[in-house]
């Protein structure tokens, strides 16, 4: 990923002082690299869905713990393996998005709004909710946008982590109960996937490839590209960014201190 200079030449908005950006390139790249790895894991789970669900359900939810995947695999997993692996996988991206929010502030929120327009209204509503009950919001919806917003709102680490873990465990309990209550239809779906594992494998691989191709064709980048070029996109989206780029000659042009979705959310 590109080495974007991390020094702030003066700042563009007031949030620069509250959100100074990552401490250095190495730390930034480790966080972005971890998120890219999680996105790749989600692609693998989606492409190999029929094989992994049938033969290796624990690996399946370890790669991608979306609600659908958890509900389908739950019946084939023990209570402890289900909760342990799913909890770790669901929690994995949350502190990373929290860090992005902490580092880039409002810029991170605007970046997610541009990259995930469906989250735009949610993020705008979050601002009002966070003013009244920030901890409750994290408990109820510990997903990527909420974790990003929690970091941007300068929420403290300890309360965030406690609320995030409590909310994620609650989510898993509900999914486990749902899977048990609807085991007959879910079992029929698993049986169909097992019976037609090979043709469904071809279809799912083709769908993942088409999804990546359509993302690149529509916006020029897929989710991995969006993460890798996050700082560039944030700089372009900052007010006054173009003027600052034209006036800077020291290589820090376009850098601001402000700123899928990772599969599994």
Image (cartoon, grey):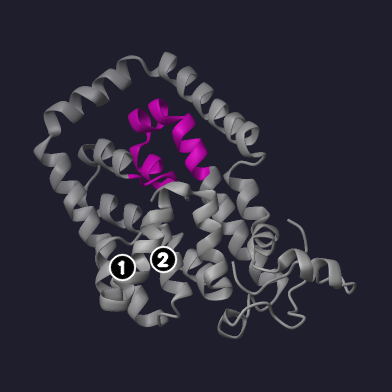
In this view, the residue in front, 63 or 146, is 146
Q: Is residue 96 left or right of residue 219?
A: left
Precedes in sequence: disc 1 or disc 2? 1
Q: Is residue 110 left or right of residue 252?
A: left
Residue 204 in percent (x, y) is at 46, 24
In this view, the residue in front, 93 or 236, is 236
* Secondary structure of the residue carrying numbered label 2: helix
Q: Residues within 10 Å of mark 1 (few under 14, many from 20)?
A: many
Residue 140 in percent (x, y) is at 24, 63
* Quarter of the image where one finds residue 155: bottom left
Q: Which residue is mark 1?
A: 138
Q: Which residue is mark 2?
A: 147
**Residues in magenta?**
41-66
Would you say residue 4 is visible in this rendering?
no
* Secondary structure of the residue carrying numbered label 1: helix
Would you say residue 34 is visible in this rendering?
yes
Q: Write the residue at 47% across / 69% down.
A: 98
Quick one: which residue is furthest to the left in this view? Answer: 181
Q: Write the residue at 29% across / 60% down.
A: 141
Residue 41 in percent (x, y) is at 51, 44
Position of the N terminus by quadrant? bottom right
Q: Residues within 10 Å of mark 2 (few under 14, many from 20)?
A: many
Prevailing secondary structure class for the magenta stretch in the rendered image = helix
Pointers 1 and 2 in contact (CB under 8 A)?
yes
Q: Write the residue at 43% across / 16% down.
A: 198
* Quarter of the image where one finds residue 49: top left
Q: Write the residue at 24% across / 61% down.
A: 169
**How far apart are the two marked residues, 1 and 2, measured between alpha carbons?**
7 Å
* Quarter of the image where one finds residue 127: bottom left
């Amino acid at each position: 990923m590109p080495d974007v200079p991390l020094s702030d030449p003066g700042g563009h908005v007031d949030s620069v002082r509250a959100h100074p950006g990552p401490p250095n390139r190495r730390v930034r790249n480790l966080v972005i690299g971890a998120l890219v790895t999680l996105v790749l894991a989600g692609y693998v789970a989606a492409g190999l869905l029929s094989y992994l669900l049938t033969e290796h359900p624990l690996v399946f939810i370890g790669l991608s713990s979306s609600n659908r995947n958890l509900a389908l695999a739950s019946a084939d997993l023990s209570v402890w393996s289900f909760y342990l692996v799913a909890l770790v996988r669901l929690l994995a991206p949350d502190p990373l998005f929290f860090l992005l929010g902490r580092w880039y502030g409002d810029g991170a929120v605007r970046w997610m709004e541009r990259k995930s327009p469906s989250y735009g209204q949610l993020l705008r509503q979050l601002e009002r909710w966070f003013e009244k009950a920030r901890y409750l919001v994290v408990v109820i919806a510990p997903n990527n946008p909420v974790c990003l917003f929690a970091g941007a709102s300068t929420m403290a680490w300890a309360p965030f982590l406690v609320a995030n873990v409590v909310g994620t465990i609650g989510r898993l309990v509900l999914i486990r109960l749902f899977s048990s209550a609807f085991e007959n239809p879910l079992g029929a779906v698993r049986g169909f996937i097992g019976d037609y594992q090979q043709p469904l494998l071809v279809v799912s691989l083709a769908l993942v490839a088409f999804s990546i191709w359509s993302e690149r064709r529509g916006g020029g980048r897929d989710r991995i590209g969006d993460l890798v070029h996050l700082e560039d996109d944030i700089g372009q989206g900052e007010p006054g960014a173009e003027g600052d780029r034209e006036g800077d000659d020291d290589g820090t042009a376009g850098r601001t201190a402000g700123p899928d979705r990772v599969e599994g959310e």
